[in-house]
Amino acid sequence: MSSNRLVDGLSAHDILNESDGDKQTIAYATKKLLSLADKYYASAQAGLRYLPFRSRVAIAAALAVYREIGVVLRDRQYDVYQGRVVVSKLRKTRAMTQMLLGLRQWTVRSDKAHEPALHEAIASLRHHSE
């Protein structure tokens, strides 16, 4: 596949043209990406306990808000053509509150296994920076 093909053989031009057949492909790709993002969010949330408390709270709040963008996209059936995703202040507040209510869990050490597969996409970048 050519490097200018972004999603299942579609180019940026194809994506911008919004044809009905391409919309389904893009919605499916969006669904897959959000599923992967959820794995990264879960991994990040599990790692919060290793951060200093103030950093932990700030990053947890950001995690909750950014994750909510994906939740809104899911609510739209992954239709990225409905316009920019806007998360209301109320929705942001709810997401952050739910996240911060889990604060007690962040200080408890667990033996939950880390998912090393999440690092595969960036593993090759380490060699480029050396």
Image (cartoon, helix red, strand yellow):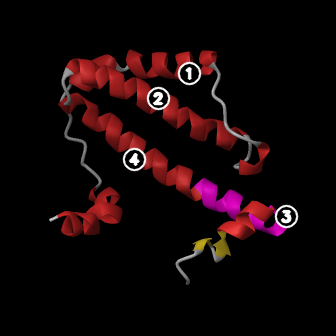
Q: In the rendered view, would you say 38 is above or below 45? A: below
Nearer the observer: mark 4 or 1; the answer is 1
Q: Is residue 111 left or right of residue 77?
A: left
Could you tell which of marks 4 and 2 lies nearer the N-terminus? Answer: 4
Reading the image, the residue beneath label 1 is: 92
Residue bounds of the magenta highlight: 18-31
Q: Does the residue at mark 4 contact the one at mark 2 (Cβ under 8 Å)?
A: no
At which x and y percent is residue 27? 70, 57
Circle number at residue 20 = 3
Of residue 39 and residue 88, the one placed in the foreground of this image is 88
Q: Which residue is mark 4?
A: 40
Residue 64: assigned label:
2
Q: Main secondary structure of the magenta part?
A: helix
**Camera-nearest residue between 91 and 9:** 9
Q: Residues within 10 Å of mark 2 (few under 14, many from 20)?
A: many
Label 1 crowding class (10 Å Cα cut-off): few <14, some 14-19, many 20+? some
The quadrant holding residue 10 is: bottom right
Answer few, some or many: residues within 10 Å of disc 4's Cα (few below 14, many 20 plus, some between 14 and 19). Answer: some
Amino acid beneath label 1: Lys
